[in-house]
Image (cartoon, rainbow, N blue to C red):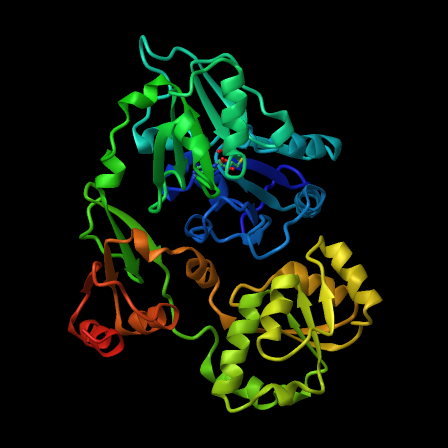
Amino acid sequence: MKKNNQQEKGYVYIIGAGPGDPDLLTLKAERALHASDVILYDDLVTSALVDRFEGLKIYTGKRKDSHHFEQDAINEEIVRHALRGKTVARLKGGDPFVFGRGGEEIDVLRQHRIDYEIIPGITAAHGASSYSEIPLTMRKVSSSVAFCTGHPINKIQAPDADTLVYYMVASSVHAVLEAVLKKGRSESTKVAIVQNATRYNQQVFTGTIGEFLRRDRVAYSPALLIIGENINHFIEENWFSRKKKVLTVGGEPTHFSNRDYVRVNFPCRREEAAERSVLEECFNTIGDWPVVFFPNRFAVKYFFSYLMEFGRDVRHLSGARICTLGRPAATELQKYGILSDFELEPESPSAIAGMLKDGGISAQKVLLPGSNLVDSYLVNALEEEGNTVTPLSVYLHGKHEQEESIDLDFIDEIWFSSPSCVKNFSALYRSIPERITVTTADGETAAEYARLFGS
Ligand code: SAH
């Protein structure tokens, strides 16, 4: 990939990715991402966005199901790649300098004398404001705005501004509203909560402070809370809610205009993760591996579906030491009646190498099932301990994230590009609600759809 030729040390771009809609990335950020060797991306950055770039992608966020990198480990990763002369993109949700800890990351870069630049992004407040049609300022109604945080709960502030926007509120809505009441605002003040702003599944909840205080759980992360008189101008059917949400499964259809549609892509590149013959060969001799290492729960899930498909079962693994990274992988493994022999905590590569050493995973032959994009940091950690690693691709990168995130409740139409994409999709979704309009690229695809979904 592209090299930075002015200096031996690498270069770091701290980039704001915007609030969710991948099209809200700036042109400058796009250019920097194309030039980056390594992309470290956060929780709030969608795979639809990072998948467009070629650099090695390292996910540093926290999801419901996995431990997160500690800030120190993220800093360590950025520095490690930069010191090896790489161009590193640190991609963060929204804007890096709005509740983004961008300040802490540049401190570390300064200490190591690594050159960097900062590329702003559209912060969630601006995304939510435009996509829900709630202006943040309005002549005669609101002439000041404050961005605040709902976390930690004992440090909530209610500044003296006409419009207040709270970040990180999913579990502190009540505490925020109480803080605002204490500052003298009335119970009848309007509140809007914008959940998943700018994404196909955006939801806006409105009511008064009093009403929200009487409701239980109001929002799920990511959500923003906006308080102020300008919300009186909110209209239920705004420009974004009026657009149809179409899920396109594979292909690049051009007939869904941006004017009428919001497109959500379901990537569907190939049916198999690896060549069938490679998989078959590996599963035929699956009993020969001294160590099988599962880096996440998707690796477990897809590995076992192939195991059965090739006529093997768990008894064939009885001679292997089974290792897992993170709790979710170990939990998934139990569904197949196997307890992990060695459970590692997801940490920085150097810490992982240390744990492997302590666990006696040294100088072994290790099978590493995973996605088609190999986690080089894990391979490096294993190799550091003298192991020989054979990666086995059992699922496609990005697919597991889609599986987690596409909520058909928000989808109005689905379009399939090919018969194999219908098949791929049917492995994850058993049925499609009748309300959804389904169209296909051609007759063959329609036939496959009829065969698998029965209409
Ligand atoms: N740097 C980010 C904020 C990170 S803090 C920015 O500038 O937007 C994380 C918080 O941002 C979340 O808890 C949520 O309050 C808010 N947020 C981020 N993306 C959001 C989205 N798509 N919809 C609603 N809130 C969002």
Between 63 and 434, the residue placed more toward the observer is: 434
Instruction: Locate residue 41 relative to residue 108 in the image: left or right.
Output: left
- Residue 305 in picture, x, y percent from top left: 49, 79
- Asked if residue 278 shows in the view, the reply is no
Residue occupying image coordinates x 21% and y 72% = 445
Q: Nearer the viewer, residue 10 or 29?
A: 29
Q: Is residue 386 above or below residue 120?
A: below
Residue drawn at point x = 54 percent, y = 77 percent: 303
Residue nearest the viewer, comparing 270 with 55? 270
- Whole-percent x, y for residue 227 in the image: 42, 23
Question: Exactly how many numbered labels are in the figure?
Answer: 0
> Which of the 4 image quarters holds residue 132?
top left
Check the image and name the residue furthest to the top.
Answer: 140
- Residue 354 location (% of width, % of height): 81, 60
Q: Is residue 18 left or right of residue 37?
A: left
242 left or right of 171 in image: left
Q: Identify the residue at image location x=28%, y=58%.
A: 248
When asked about the image quadrant of residue 287, the answer is: bottom right
Query: Could one spot residue 14 in this view of the protein?
Result: yes
